[in-house]
Image (cartoon, rainbow, N blue to C red):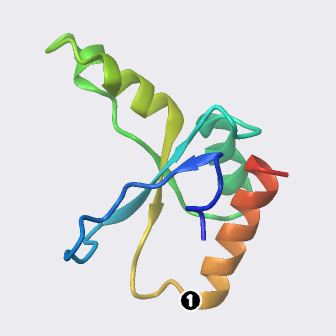
Amino acid sequence: ALVPYDAFHVPPTPEGALPVYPCFLLRLTRFARTTAEDLSKLLRESGIENRRVMVPATERELAKLPCTEEARQSSILLPIHPELSPEDRERTLDAIFDYAIG
């Protein structure tokens, strides 16, 4: 549902493979109406579970990886679990569309 929008970058699944994610990585592009930090906060305030991407190695001074900081700043993680009902999925998508595309 998120793939057609320029505001989002959704990780591709290689051809012939099944997606296996413990959570769904959603990356906001420059076309999004909000930042990942603000979207994460708005979703949590709406009762929608999400997390931010972990602190990259660059902030721990272990390595210099320029793309990790950008990825952390532009991404949120949405949970994927068997208890996620179709209604919860739609509510999450509606909230993301409202806040990030408007």
Residue that protrudes farthest toward the right in the picture: 102
Residue at 59% in and 63% down: 2
Mark 1 residue element: loop
Q: 66 or 53, which lies in front?
A: 66
Disc 1 marks a residue whose amino acid type is Ser
Q: Which residue is mark 1?
A: 85
* Residue 25 in the image: above or below residue 90: above
Q: Number of labelled discs?
A: 1
Q: Image quadrant for the N terminus?
A: bottom right
* Residue 3 in the image: above or below residue 70: below
Whole-percent x, y for residue 42 in the image: 73, 49
Residue at 38% in and 22% down: 69
Residue that protrudes farthest toward the front in the picture: 15
Residue at 60% in and 39% down: 36
Q: Residues within 10 Å of mark 1 (few under 14, many from 20)?
A: few
Residue 13 placement, left or right of 50: left
Whole-percent x, y for residue 87 in the image: 67, 87
Q: Classify residue 17 by image quadrant.
A: bottom left
Q: Classify residue 5 by image quadrant.
A: bottom right
* Residue 6 in the image: above or below residue 29: below
